[in-house]
Amino acid sequence: MIPTAKQMAEAIRINTEKLVRAEILEVESMSAAQALASDLLRQEKLGDGWAITVDREYPFAFRTLITDGGIIFRPVVSVDRIVIDSKLDEGFQHLDIALQLACVENKYHARWHFDKANLKGKGQYQDGPLYHLQFGGHVPNQANDFWLKEPRWAHAPMDLILLLEAVAANFYTDEWTEKIRRDPTWCEYVSQSERMCLSVYLEKIQKFLNIRSDTVLSGLWANA
């Protein structure tokens, strides 16, 4: 259910290459993918898990787009840290991956994090769902940081493969539909990440759907 470091290295490298060829990701994103793949292959020898980081300065950068109002922007994906421990049922020891819509003129930005709640100490997490989607966050050298940390929306874990697919499908729908969506190799690697990210999460949801004295949100809360 949890891919090895080698399997994840291959998935990142090949799916990034497919997005570049489809003119969805910029060519420079291959450098980030190759660096990740090389690092993951080094970690393969360690055995029990793996970790990745994608610096904000060298992110997975998508092709620029323009809104109806004439604002030019590009989606960029970075990873503060994802740490996988194969000894954990849920896999994720740490999760913090972000999507930013970066305005070329540096006037506006929007940013979303897919996180696992932070431990505050003594086994207690920050308030909110254990896995959540959160808007905002500080971006160096950017004005207009969003000032509110809540709400933290209950959301399934997202790894790099799943977030790249979500961005491609939402912002580059025609290219994704025509060149990516039904590609067997692409689907194989996405399915690998879906099994890692969704299996335990959906089992927990199903469990609480069958309990009338509690709620799904309560079951997904970090300090349940």
Image (cartoon, rainbow, N blue to C red):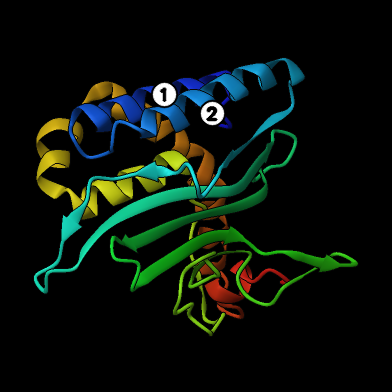
Residue 176 in the figure: left or right of residue 86 = left
Task: Compare residues 72 and 60 and report the one nearer the observer.
Answer: 72
Compared to 43, does 87 lie above or below? Answer: below
Residue count near mark 1 (Cα–Cα under 10 Å), binned few <14, some 14–19, many ≥20 = some
Q: Residue at the location (28% across, 38% down)?
A: 25
Mark 2 or mark 1, earlier in chain: 1
Q: Residue at the location (69% across, 33% down)?
A: 86
Q: Residue at the location (52% across, 81% down)?
A: 151
Quickly name the residue at label 1. 13
Compared to 37, does 143 lie above or below? Answer: below
Task: Compare residues 177 and 70 and report the one nearer the observer.
Answer: 70
Q: Residue at the location (30% across, 51% down)?
A: 167
Quickly name the residue at label 2. 36
User: Where does the image place residue 181, in percent across and percent down from the top left?
Assistant: 19, 36
Quarter holding the N terminus?
top right
Residue count near mark 2 (Cα–Cα under 10 Å), binned few <14, some 14–19, many ≥20 = many
Q: Tell me the SS state at disc 2.
A: helix
User: Where does the image place residue 56, in percent across and percent down from the top left?
Assistant: 51, 50
User: Which residue type carries mark 1?
Assistant: Arg
Compared to 55, does 110 lie above or below? Answer: below
Residue 183 is marked as: none
Badge count: 2
User: Where does the image place residue 145, in percent across and percent down from the top left?
Assistant: 48, 77
Asked whether the residues under the numbered discs 2 and 1 touch, taking CB atoms below 8 Å apart as contact, a structural biologist would say yes
The picture quadrant where one finds residue 127 is bottom right
